[in-house]
Amino acid sequence: MKRREFLLGSSAAAGAFGLGGLSLAASDPVQELVVQPASYRLRGQRTTGMVSLSPDAPPPVLYGRQGETLRLTVRNTLPDYTAMHWHGLRIRNEMDGVPYLTQMPIGENESFTYELTPPDAGTYWYHPHCMTMDQMARGLTGVMVIAEPEDPGFDSEQVINLRDFRLDEDDAFLSAYTARGAARAGTFGNVQTANWRSEAVYDHAAGSLVRVRVVNTDTTRIYNLHPEGAQTRIIAWDGHPVETDVTRPTAAQPLLLAPGQRVDLAVRMPDDEGQSALLLAKFPGQKHRAMVRLRATGHSIARDLRELRPLQANPVPRPDLDQAELHEFVFGWTPEGGAPNDGFCGSLGYSFWSINRTPWPGDAAQGTGPLAVLQRGKSYVLRLRNESPNLHPIHLHGLAFVPLTSNLRKLPPLLSDTMLLLKDETVDIALVADNPGDWAFHCHVIEHQKTGLTGFIRVI
């Protein structure tokens, strides 16, 4: 086994990246993931009441390989229900982890075994889809890396899980949401972290090439990000290789990374020991702040970004726009009289949002049909119209799409599963309905999702 293969496949190496890690392979036995209470020093004092897959650490990075089956048993030790969704993976519908749509929720001391065979390489993540607001806000969000069959030539990699926690002055959890926040842009946290650290510092060889996988697993916050201090380029977006040149983000024109979205960066580390490559974020009313510092160590190995082999395209079918059928979706507020959902998987007690002016009635509501029915193998254009002044990252399970046009901006043709809609924006996206099943379709600002802005699309 080459050093590179060992580095990316061992839990010890993943631990050096700051998140712990589990290496998974088709030959492995079923790996158990235990949802459990946790505590961690996010700031000054240790915060209790967190939720993770270990009692004192963030959820680990799960490592798999493209085309190989992963077997993961999720065991729940919490008194609340849970279920695990594998965000961005185009897998079998019954493994998607959406309670009452694809499976029953997992009760206390119950387990569910997921068998996932990812057709695509890239950066993905996992989170609960039952009691979503509470469990995600308390920490249950983790990164999943699906490796390409061919090594593109990096010397190391760094996984970055961006999270925002809402704590009081004693470092205890405040309520994860407010009614005012849910009816607007969402309720923001006050402790911004990378890998559960307020200031994350990691060492990488001077002059080396580092693959930096950045994932926004927050419940609300859209991050304004830009790199500084090193040569950097974007190589993948939402798991899929970037096939056209994408402008490098700057302080003046930062990258918007919404909840659910991911970006892979190729970083050429500085040559001098002690120098740093930075990932900076801008928060309202604050100066730019380094979320992550990659510190150069040792003598420069003098790599060049041009040495990297291009990432191979994932096997996503491309839509035939000449034959595509159009479906329209309106995202906006709930009409007067909308009732809150039934709460089997957590209700916020309000109904503020809707799709096509109909709020989602609940996880187990009777008589709720799909927003659209698509024929397997056919091409479609989905027109997404935001009728509100708030931003909405719209996530579609089980399928990948290509953004086409916007009434407000030029969109690069990046394969994705999560489309950030700006204020009053209308975006056309195109896809091939190649994966049968009932696929959740919702805003990834979780307060919006849980107060009506969700539904599902059926592929038959």
Image (spheres, grey):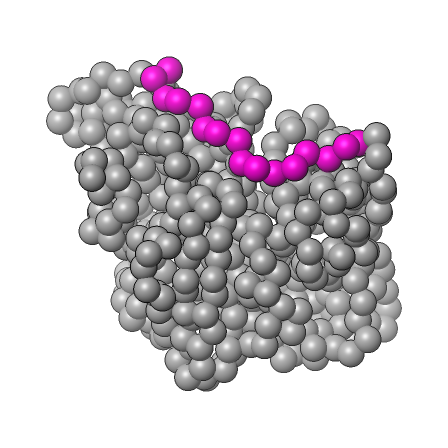
Q: Toward the viewer: 75 or 445?
A: 75
Q: Write the residue at 48% across / 57% down.
A: 116
Quick one: quadrant of the N terminus?
Answer: top left
Expressed as whole percent of the image width and height from the top left, the position of residue 457 reads 74, 57
Residue located at (62% from left, 68% from top): 102
Residue 123's quadrant in the figure?
top left
Image height of 224 relative to 114, above or below: above
Left or right: 71 in relation to 29:
right
Q: Is residue 192 above or below residue 252?
A: below
**203 horizontally vs 233: left or right:** left
Residue 302 image offset from top left, x and y in percent: 23, 16
User: Camera-side residue: 101 or 202?
Assistant: 101
Q: From which residue to which does the magenta span run? A: 306-321
On screen, residue 13 versus residue 144, left or right, reads left
Name the chief secondary structure element in magenta: loop
In the depicted structure, whether residue 107 falls above or below residue 450: below
- Find the residue positioned furthest to the front: 27
In percent of width and height, residue 305 lies at: 36, 19
**Residue 86 appears anywhere in the view:** yes
Q: Residue placed at 36% from the left, 66% from the top?
A: 30
State the image coordinates of residue 442 (x, y, percent, origin top left).
68, 57
Is residue 51 part of the magenta span, yes or no?
no
Residue 307 located within the stretch drawn in magenta: yes
Closest to the observer, 458 or 134: 458
